Image (cartoon, helix red, strand yellow):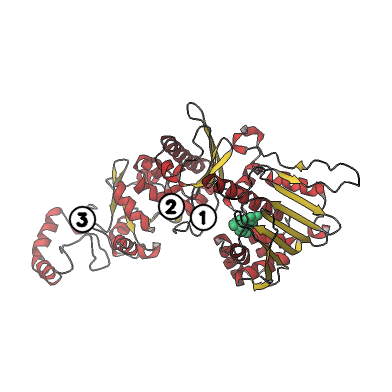
Amino acid sequence: MPTETHEFQVEARQLLKLMIHSVYSNKDVFLRELVSNASDALDKLRLEKLRDDSLDADVSDLHIEIETDKDARTLTVRDNGIGMSYDEVGQLIGTIANSGTAKFLQELKESQDAQNAEGLIGQFGVGFYSGFMVADEVTLLTRRAGETQGTRWTSRGEGTYTLETVDDAPQGTSVTLHLKPADPENQLHDYTAPWKIREIIKRYSDFITWPVRMVPEKPAEGDQAPEPETLNSMKALWARPRDEVTDDEYHELYKHIGHDWRDPLETIRLQAEGTFEYQALLFLPEHAPHDLFTREYRRGLQLYVKRVLIMDECEALLPPYLRFVKGVVDAADLSLNVSREILQQDRHIEMMRRRLTKKVLSTVKDLMTKDQDRYATFWREFGTAVKEGLVTDPENRDAILAVASFASTRHESELTTLKDYVARMKEGQEDIYYLAGESRQAIENSPHMEAFRDRGIEVLLLTDAVDEVWADAVGEFEGKKLRSVAKGQIDLGAKDEDGTEEDREKRTEEYSGLLDWMKEKLAEDVKEVRLSSRLTVSPACVVSDTGDLTPALENMYRAMGQ
Ligand code: ADP
Ligand code: MG
């Protein structure tokens, strides 16, 4: 096949332009990205070979190699992992599929100033393309495991790339950067210097579980070639004593497995001892990925057995409502070739899931008491997901309620916990009141709110679709019923001008003709018409029966196609 020239997808072109002209101060991270991709590729090949022994690939010495050439000014990162097919190269490298990146570009479009753009690079993963921060040309040579032909991809990052097939490509992928001239002014180091490479790998990629080797310089004629040097310690962070590992090291591991450029919000360590031993290292991200509520969202923890990765996205280790948690679980005693189906029912996995779930929830609880700001960030980003657990995980309902917080009429932006709400309840108030709706404003404008506002009774303002479902399912908190102000008859206690119980009965009698007439006229639409003491301004409002669906719930079920 002749060499084909392709155009980058529009978003990809935008991103590349940014990389090429980047003044982003920490350019060293391009190497972390390339090593991270190589490590993923080795994991994938190992797992694929485990599933399919007949795959024609050599897995006896999986590793990453870094080679520099001072004279040619090149740096090559090579792996003998899964590789990519011709089509995959076009898809994976020529376009931007990564959703975080799409969001990054969106935000970039909105903020045109360069300073801001630099900040954004630091926040979003730009993966493979980050090579263009330090190189003016990038070549990628790859062969997909099991295939005979390879593919060469080349680009100067300026709108087009070329693709050609190659007959004698080795197993895996090599990425060669043709480096820009070093420029200390612009944080552009000499990336052909072995000491610099050593420093970067140690700093960002030390925990990578595959050896990262430096290819030694060619020996003088007649001399023996020196042994390649392994740059990383490959020590599993989760297996090392806590006080030996720095926060930075944990954060780098998070960035690798979470495909995130930001530090995590919180790191959670857990060592389980006894008959079934395992270690876990979990992370709460600082930002929710934009696809968290879509089917495409890929959840799950990495599952290791004695330091060997056996499953990349093991969903069985945490319930769906904690799907945003990233991390690693390493069990001492688990079969190496378990399938996903079996895992779902495995007794030990079940044990781990229960323990990890409790640990995550108790960590959030700690955040709540120790660090209000970080708790607020967590709840803003993930509260909606966590609340699903109130419906799906009755066992942890109390723990979830304890870390949940809600908007209320008490304050325009501060949230309240149920506990604090109860503590503020007025004398004589028996129930916890809430109203669900599309937005805070819509709820506050609802006629249902009038009597409560009038009497100064606090109402929780719930705006997530899941809110009504859990409020129904949970029913009460600390013995206080959760009641929608839009449902059933609510006795707020008479106000003076309403007169006594007797007065009201008399009035009902007085108006019975009108009420019956209205009931007849509206028979198709309503069950009952009654006098209300809950309105102060509006002449009438529609109320659901306690067991009925409210309009918001009806909408939600309709949206879910039920
Ligand atoms: P991410 O790693 O977050 O997916 P990248 O831009 O770093 O994003 O990489 C894009 C994709 O290109 C990867 O998901 C992977 O499928 C493919 N890829 C990159 N480098 C390699 C490699 N060394 N071997 C195999 N596939 C790779
Ligand atoms: Mg990557």
Quick one: 34 or 405, which is closer to the camera? 34
Q: Is residue 52 above or below residue 158?
A: above
Give the CA separation, mark 2 to mark 3: 32 Å
* Circle 1 residue: 288
The residue nearer to you, when weighing 276 against 5, is 5
Q: Position of residue 530 (x, y in %)?
A: 16, 62
SS at badge 2:
helix
Horizontal side, residue 321 vs residue 261: left or right: left
Q: Is residue 276 visible?
A: yes
Name, please, the residue furthest toward the right: 221
Q: Dot 2, how many residues are within 10 Å of its Cα: few (below 14), some (14-19), or many (20+)?
A: many
Q: Residue at x 69, y 60 (%)?
A: 141
Q: Secondary structure at mark 3?
A: loop
Q: State the residue position of label 2.
A: 385
Looking at this view, is 361 or 137 the one in front? Answer: 137
Identity of the amino acid at label 3?
A: Gln
Which circle, 3 or 1, is nearer the viewer?
1
